[in-house]
């Protein structure tokens, strides 16, 4: 289903009245022209989930143009920081994306929810004077920009109120933990002065939360890896089926050609035999007449 919130023509008119931050994001287009001094790496189509369609948070960028420019700016910021690991002497110059937004069902038909999903494809521009990263490396980096904790950063980038709510939630959780500690301290004093080491408990809680995050990120990466491997396997299977089909067609064509050649040979023999019979008949008639 078509999932854009606004009419493109209406949004073009409204763009003039948007705040300064959004205007800066809109200006992030592929301004660098491809010249002999530049080269590009193609970014394969990738997907990322947004929030459910029933979420109270409003997506900051809804029009296809501003959505594409915003996600390109997000990817560019991620690449500038994370691509240095391969060769820091040729950083990316710019990234251009074409993105669309649609709805996707999650869960069963009765209890499932609809989630906004963005799909993007594009390319990243580099200087021709330096080395060009491999396409596989670039696409892996882009996938990582939307996985684990980075996916949370992406949601905060797309939904300003989502970040505010998370900060408020963290604040409330901190206050709740502080209240629990005070209650435990008070209880320990009542039952005989049992000393609760608050610092140790806080360390244990932090360690537990970090471990949970690491496990979640590892699980997310494993799923992404399995998904890519499955796609590659499916692609190889399709290529193998296509190769076998072409081989079968080629073999069939050769058999048909041999059959046609045999038919031609038979026809030539029949014609030759008919001609010999006619020649003998003609000679016989001429000998009788003389």
Image (cartoon, helix red, strand yellow):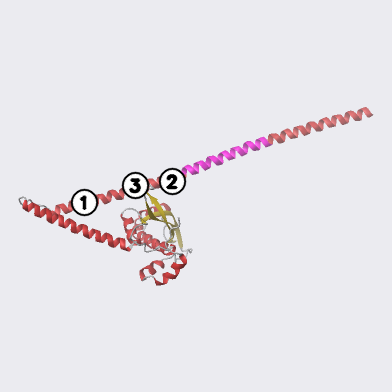
Q: Whole-percent x and y of residue 278? A: 84, 32
Compared with 29, 223 (above or below) is above
Quadrant of the image for the N terminus? bottom left
Q: Which residue is mark 3?
A: 222
Report if residue 254 lies within the magenta region. Answer: yes
Q: Which mark is residue 232?
A: 2
Compared across the picture, whether 166 is left or right of 195 comes to right
User: For the residue labelled by badge 3, is the local secondary structure a helix, a strand or a loop?
Assistant: helix
Quadrant of the image for the C terminus? top right
- Point out the stretch of residues depicted in magenta: 236-260
Please tell me which of labels 1 and 2 falls first in the chain.
1
Q: Which residue is mark 1?
A: 207
Q: Quadrant of residue 276?
A: top right
- Residue 160 in sight from this viewpoint: yes
* Cβ–Cβ under 8 Å for marks 3 and 1: no
Q: Residue pushed farthest bottom? A: 17
Alpha-carbon distance for marks 3 and 1? 22 Å
Q: Residue at horizontal 30%, vertical 55%?
A: 149
Nearer-the-camera pick, 11 or 269: 11
Q: Quadrant of residue 174?
A: bottom left
């Amino acid at each position: 289903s078509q999932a854009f919130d606004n009419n493109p023509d209406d949004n073009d008119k409204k763009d003039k009245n948007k705040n300064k931050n959004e205007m800066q994001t809109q200006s992030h287009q592929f301004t660098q022209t491809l010249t002999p001094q530049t080269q590009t790496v193609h970014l394969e189509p990738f997907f990322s989930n947004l929030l459910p369609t029933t979420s109270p948070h409003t997506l900051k960028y809804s029009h296809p143009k501003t959505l594409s420019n915003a996600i390109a700016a997000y990817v560019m910021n991620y690449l500038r920081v994370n691509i240095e690991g391969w060769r820091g002497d040729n950083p990316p110059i710019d990234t251009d994306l074409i993105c669309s937004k649609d709805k996707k069902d999650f869960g069963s038909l009765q209890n499932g929810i609809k989630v906004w999903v963005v799909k993007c494809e594009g390319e990243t521009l580099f200087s021709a004077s330096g080395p060009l990263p491999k396409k596989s490396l670039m696409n892996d980096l882009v996938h990582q920009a939307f996985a684990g904790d980075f996916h949370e950063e992406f949601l905060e980038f797309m939904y300003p109120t989502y970040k505010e709510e998370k900060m408020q939630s963290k604040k409330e959780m901190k206050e709740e933990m502080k209240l629990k500690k005070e209650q435990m301290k008070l209880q320990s004093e009542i039952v005989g002065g049992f000393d609760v080491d608050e610092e140790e408990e806080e360390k244990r809680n932090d360690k537990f939360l970090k471990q949970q995050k690491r496990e979640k990120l590892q699980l997310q990466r494993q799923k992404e890896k399995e998904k890519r491997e499955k796609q590659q396997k499916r692609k190889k299977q399709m290529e193998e089926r296509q190769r076998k089909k072409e081989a079968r067609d080629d073999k069939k064509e050769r058999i048909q050609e041999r059959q046609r050649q045999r038919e031609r040979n038979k026809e030539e023999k029949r014609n030759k035999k008919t001609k010999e019979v006619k020649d003998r008949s003609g000679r016989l008639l001429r000998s009788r007449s003389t």
